[in-house]
Image (cartoon, grey):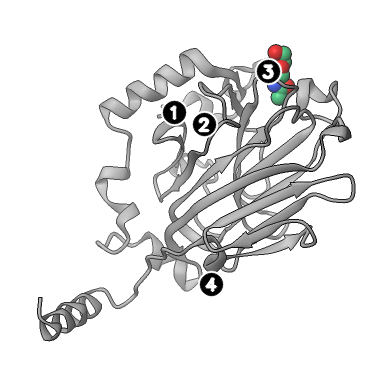
Amino acid sequence: MANFEKMLVAFFIFAIAPSIVLVDATFSDSMYLTWGLQHASLQADNLSLVLDQNSGSAAQTKIPYLFGSFESRIKLVPGNSAGTVTAYYLSSTGNKHDEIDFEFLGNISGQPYIIHTNVFTQGNGSREQQFYPWFDPTADFHNYTIHWNPTEIVWYVDSIPIRVFRNYQSAGIAYPNQQGMSLYTSLWNADGWATRGGLVKINWSGAPFIARYNQFRARACPFNGPASINQCAANIPSNWWTSPLYKQLGYASLGQLNWVRSNYMIYDYCKDTKRFNGQLPPECYKQQF
Ligand SMILES: *[C@@H]1O[C@H](CO)[C@@H](O)[C@H](O)[C@H]1NC(C)=O
């Protein structure tokens, strides 16, 4: 295309989509380190979080978002990672906060990690689902994606959906759609609960522990206060996450989800009748995916 034509196209796109909402930037463009600066590193498209006896480390996005997709490739702490937790999650701030979690609970060498997921709405969590990975998450990078739109949240591992949380606001069940959330990553000492429920402690002779992240992409709607609540949910082409395509998983994806649930799921709050004294949280009685 000639330059003039390119300019015309650019002008046209800008004219029909006055609010450019797509963000597509590298780690170092979109995040900053917040903890453990002395040993963590954030360069170009690579983030390394380090945990030693002095401190863990953490990074977060510079801005909050409302809806979109957040993906990163992550290579978890290898070897004896018992007691460590590597996290990748969205969270708002304040006491009625929303949160969507991926947490990776380490283990002693040769024993499986746990992929721990949860969702908080208006400050309430207790919606854990846990899975064993079907691969060694420390041998290589794997893609972990949180997809969040007005109708559902989907957690993906290497493009395979492992969990869905649907919007049942019409039935009085809170859904995260009013508060912007930032994306956080962290690596810390959680040996009070992470491995075999806290039985296995960190072995510091293996320190420093390192978790590596790369290719972070937030294709998401920047949250700029209350006006964004309607803007980011508006059913317009530039809000790609509102497309009917993303309202429910397709047939093939549902098949993958069921494969993960039947072979790798190790905990589902919606099956834990004992914990909830026989009365499960209301969304557990709805169609879940
Ligand atoms: C660690 O390994 C033990 C034994 O195989 C297993 O029961 C546990 O679920 C594994 N993962 C974590 C994070 O505790």
Question: Gap between marks 1 and 2, in whole Å?
Answer: 7 Å
Q: Position of residue 68 (x, y in %)?
A: 42, 54
Q: Which residue is mark 3?
A: 110
- Between residues 63 and 140, which one lies in front from this camera angle? 140
- Between residues 166 and 168, which one lies in front from this camera angle? 166
Tell me the crowding category of disc 1: few under 14, some 14 to 19, or many 20 or more residues within 10 angstroms, Cα based. Answer: some
Labelled disc at residue 283: 2
Q: Position of residue 98 (x, y in %)?
A: 61, 51
Q: Is residue 250 visible?
A: yes
Q: Amino acid at mark 1?
A: Gln
Residue at disc 3, secondary structure:
loop
Respond yes or no on whether mark 2 lies under 8 Å from ligand 1. Answer: no
Tell me the crowding category of disc 4: few under 14, some 14 to 19, or many 20 or more residues within 10 angstroms, Cα based. Answer: few
Residue located 86% across and 27% down the image = 201
Question: Gap between marks 2 and 4, in whole Å?
Answer: 28 Å
Which quadrant, please, contains the C terminus? top left
Question: Gap between marks 4 and 1, in whole Å?
Answer: 30 Å
- The earlier-in-sequence mark between 1 and 2 is 2
Nearer the observer: mark 3 or 1; the answer is 3
- The earlier-in-sequence mark between 4 and 1 is 4
Q: Is residue 267 above or below residue 194?
A: above
Question: Gap between marks 3 and 2, in whole Å?
Answer: 36 Å
Q: Which residue is mark 4?
A: 225
Question: Gap between marks 3 and 1, in whole Å?
Answer: 33 Å
Residue located 10% across and 81% down the image = 2
Q: Amino acid at mark 2?
A: Glu
Q: Amino acid at mark 4?
A: Gly
Q: Are marks 4 and 1 in contact (CB under 8 Å)?
A: no
Q: Is residue 257 above or below residue 100?
A: above
Q: Position of residue 266 (x, y in %)?
A: 60, 17
